[in-house]
Amino acid sequence: MTAASSFLRDAPIEHVIVPPQASELAARYDGLLAILTVICGAVLLLITVLIVVQAVRFRARGGGPRGYDRLRARHWWVEAAWTLPTLIIFLGFFAGGLALYLAAFEPTQAPALTINVIGKQWMWKAEHPNGAREINELHVPAGVDVQLRLTSQDVIHSFFVPALRVKRDVLPGRYTTLGFNATRPGIYSLFCAEYCGTDHSRMRGRVVVLEEAAYADWLSRQDAAATPAAAGAVLFRSLGCSGCHAGDGPVAAPSLAGVYGRRVPLADGRFVLADEAYLRDSILLPRKHVVAGFAPVMPSYAGQVDEAELLHLIAYLQSLGAPTGPAAGPAPEEVAP
């Protein structure tokens, strides 16, 4: 059974036809779909009527010449009058769809809440900024810009919430962001929309949208042992990272204070932006980006830390402070991705 068939089986009939609009983008998606459906239906009706009328007229006059040259000579203006407006209308559809696509995939600027979500056969694991954790559930506040940091622990998954009109592929070894603003409190279905194994249809959950006060109350009642940054600090010391990067160890290593968001000079002359992907690569593939002035002696921690622990380490590094100014290097538009 697929996620789609599970949704058809369990959802109310009105939600099967049109899922509830529970986000800011939902109305825009539905509006564009409605306009596209109406215009395409009108075009289909017009073509059907023209075919029937022309067939009746042709039969009434007992046939006649149907050569292409004759039709082109007498009716070229009909072709032009039909083709040009159709082209303009569908270019309008393209422009509207492109604007909606860019709005859906544009990273959320300064989100009020960032939640880590890990896809794993066959469950969704979420961790809130205070350390509260959920499995196959995601509680979010209504009216707040939320950003999910998504990754997979094994195979490709796809995070899909029909009511929010959001869907994003979740890939192993890569961080993907998904932003939304839920406007309607309620409980909405969460699916994996990418076939990921034998129990793919069971990889389901729910998104619970609460009023801000209710969300704060729910969050305060969760058993959170430590924030991701605090857990990352403990892991940073237990793995021995502080022995070199604290600056007083036997091996010279670059300082990590304020590294997140900074342009880092590399040994090969390039500069790279120290984002989540860079920090992840530095932990698992330390020889991929060797910092200028330092020997490539850091060991790889691949296989020693899982995806949740990687996110904790990254949260800790992010907490070490913002850079006081840009490092010497190229302009932001010249920074390597």
Image (cartoon, rainbow, N blue to C red):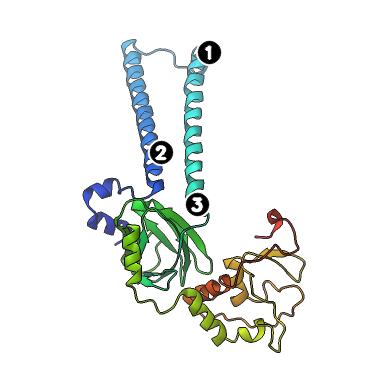
* Residue on which the image places disc 3: 105
Query: Is residue 207 among what the camera can see?
Result: no
> Mark 3 falls on what kind of element?
helix
* Side (left or right) of 287 relative to 217: right
Instruction: Provide residue 10's location: percent of width, then percent of height.
Output: 23, 57
* Side (left or right) of 55 relative to 175: left
Q: Which residue does the image show at 59% across and 73% down from the upper left?
A: 320
Q: Are marks 2 and 1 in contact (CB under 8 Å)?
A: no
- Judge whether 104 appears above or below 111 on screen: above
* Residue on which the image places disc 2: 32
Of residues 330 and 41, the one nearer the viewer is 330
Where residue 221 sits, quadrant-wise, is bottom left
What is the three-letter code of the residue carrying label 1?
A: Ala
Instruction: Provide residue 11's location: percent of width, then percent of height.
Output: 24, 54
> Mark 1 falls on what kind of element?
helix
How far is disc 2 from disc 1 in space, using C-alphas?
A: 39 Å
What is the three-letter code of the residue carrying label 3?
A: Phe
> Mark 2 falls on what kind of element?
helix
For residue 73, the mark is: 1
- Judge whether 71 appears above or below 236 on screen: above
Q: Are marks 1 and 3 in contact (CB under 8 Å)?
A: no
Query: Is residue 247 among what the camera can see?
Result: yes
